[in-house]
Amino acid sequence: MKAILRRLFPGRFAIPGVVLAAFLAVSLLTRLALLVQNGDWSLAWPGYLLPALAIGLAYDLAAGAWWMLPFALLAWLWPDGTRSRTPLAVAVFALAGGALLAWVFVAASELVFWNEFAARFNFIAVDYLVYTNEVIGNIRQSYDLRPAFAAIGVATALLLAATARALLAATRPSGMGLGARTLAFLAFAALPAASFLVLDERLKEFTPQAQAVQLAGNGHWEFFHAFRTNEIDYEQFYRTETLAKAYAIMRHEFEHSGHPDFTHNDAMPIEREVHGGGPEKRLNVVLVSVESLGAEFVGALGDRRGLTPNLDRLAAEGLFFTRVYATGTRTVRGLEALSLSLPPTPGYSVVKRPNNEHLLTVGEVFDEKGYESLYVYGGYGYFDNMNYFFGNNGYTVVDRTAIPAGQVHHENVWGVADEDLFTLALGEADKRHAAGKPFFEHVMTTSNHRPFTYPDGRVDLPSGSGREGAVRYTDWAIGDFIARARTRPWFDDTVFVIVADHTSSARGKTDLPVEGFHIPLVVYSPRHVAARTVDYVASQIDVAPTLLALLNFSYRSRFFGQDILTEGASHQRALLGNYQTVGYLEDGMLVELRPKGVWMVLDAKTGEPVPVTPRARALVDEAVGYYQSGSQAFRSGALKVGAPRAGA
């Protein structure tokens, strides 16, 4: 074995060999730590663990090849001789100390990231590089960093001590001439290029068990892979049909419940005239999208902890939808679905993509009816491109900058407390009502987000104690908001819509665990909307069409969603995704579409593959229809207001 290692790492090129061994050790320990943190001991079954370790080793070697390069460069260029050994040792130890510190820091970051997202680094981690103020602030407010930094320092020192003897031995003069060192360096330089060309994400997909797949990855490799692939062309990487067939499938989708009045727009074949079911109701609308409020916290959806008494009361007194699913796992996905009624196509949300101006949003529909549409946010709206997106798509944007410091009861890095946000929303509504202007307000909360802090004395759990306290507080704030709104002259003629932007966690055996996307939806307007419970399966993209139908609005639609109460009654389905895997839920089956044209049909409850029956194949076609035509509609500009209508 020693002879083989000497041939692979000759002379002072043993230095990058020691570095690689240390990197592999840190990567293995990180993988095992993530396994323990995940808490699902079924992953320790050899059928999961052994492949995850073996495949993980391949990714570790690929990432380690890049880390070896600077050390190989030293071994190549540093003069070979006794006099040069001491300064070489100093340089090697300094460089190794920095590398070890980086690895330990990345490992600690992965533990934090996994705690939030049950995944290795992905698009979200890349996103967070852009918004360092919010992310670093969130970490500082959520965790005591002093012991964490101390632990990182101690671990780095121990690793450096463990490798010191081998590193020092590797700095001895080797007797290799410049020519031999050059050839050796070229071999080391070829390794990263080879790993880049040979290795891709499919290697780790050895099982449908999502957490086992994630364990097989390597955080360094995953991060740079996500950085390179942060926008995904659906038609290049996913299962497709001809575009004509994809749109034909979509037209059939809207024919399930009747005979839609299609406009014969060749550029957007699902464009249709929606006709209201009676006289239009010019009611104000306040849509509250609640941060991270998954169904698992809501009493009306089965939780027994009593965390949401106010929302439970509104659900009993309003129109309550019990089987609605979020389209994604981040706020921008919820905002995209609620404003655009668009499937969660792979890659970034449209909210963050280029060329996302002048799109047909629900705000634009309200504007056409003479309303003023507002987006009201308790944080700084530059985050996640919210100000730009809403400001260029029919909304007046009002964010944290509109709140005087003296009127803030509490704030953290994400924004002001929900009660202060609702005070802002009430004030903006008062202004529009005083001016005789009907309004549509989309209000986005932030308090139910780590670090889970809020004003003292509001609920019976202390601020910063965890998710349950934050849920109690945001529910209190919603109840307080409705109570204060009830005193306004515009209350009786206002419809309140309360829906989550996404859930708090979507971890499970599969990429898209269905219950991890289950959210509440309540429509509350005592004088105009009768109390009722609706158990139809639906999606966030259906919220806008359902709301507009409740108001009997007639309008020209390019929305991919449907009215849950009419179309949704006979065609129950939901769309959900997590950046790279997108899904379609219907008839108890979940279709997953993945890159490289891969698709699967799973039992929605168990996550196990089901036989591919004709019905299952039909659902695959429907899924492709939604995602391919949705992606094409955005990329082609067909969603834009005033877009060309070829053939019209």
Image (tube, grey):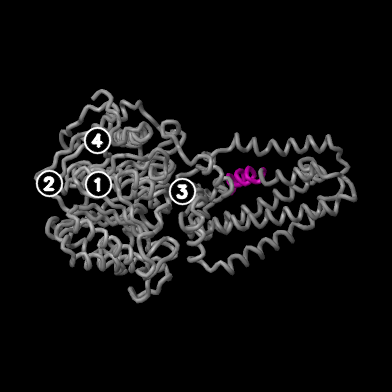
| Magenta-drawn segment | 53-65
Earlier-in-chain disc, 3 versus 4: 3
Q: Residue at x 83, y 36 (%)?
A: 180
Q: Is residue 304 visible?
A: no
Residue on which disc 3 sits: 210
Q: Are marks 4 and 1 in contact (CB under 8 Å)?
A: no
- Give the secondary structure at mark 3: helix
Return the residue at label 1: 544
Label 4 sits on residue: 253
Task: Look at label 2 and name its amino acid.
Answer: Glu
Q: Residue 415: where, in percent of width, then height?
A: 40, 62
The amino acid type, in three-letter code, at marker 1 is Ala
> Horizontal and vertical percent for residue 545?
22, 44
Say few, some or many: other residues with alpha carbon within 10 Å of mark 4 (under 14 / 14 to 19 / 20 or more): some
Residue 634 x/y as whole percent = 35, 36
Q: Earlier in the sequence, mark 2 or mark 3?
A: 3
Q: Spatial distance from mark 1 to mark 2, Cα to Cα? A: 16 Å
Which sits earlier in the primary sequence, circle 2 or circle 4?
A: 4
Mark 2 vs mark 3: give the one in front. 2
Q: Would you say the residues marked 2 and 3 are in contact, meaning their CB atoms lie under 8 Å apart?
A: no
Relative vertical location of residue 501 with respect to residue 421 in this rendering, above or below? above
Nearest to the observer: residue 529 or residue 236: 529
**CB under 8 Å between discs 3 and 4:** no
Which of the two discs, 4 and 1, sits closer to the camera? 1
Q: Earlier in the sequence, mark 1 or mark 2?
A: 2
Q: Is residue 434 magenta?
A: no
Q: Using the rendered view, name the quadrant where residue 348 is placed.
A: top left
Q: CA distance from mark 2 to mark 4?
A: 26 Å
The spot of residue 233 in percent (x, y) is 44, 34
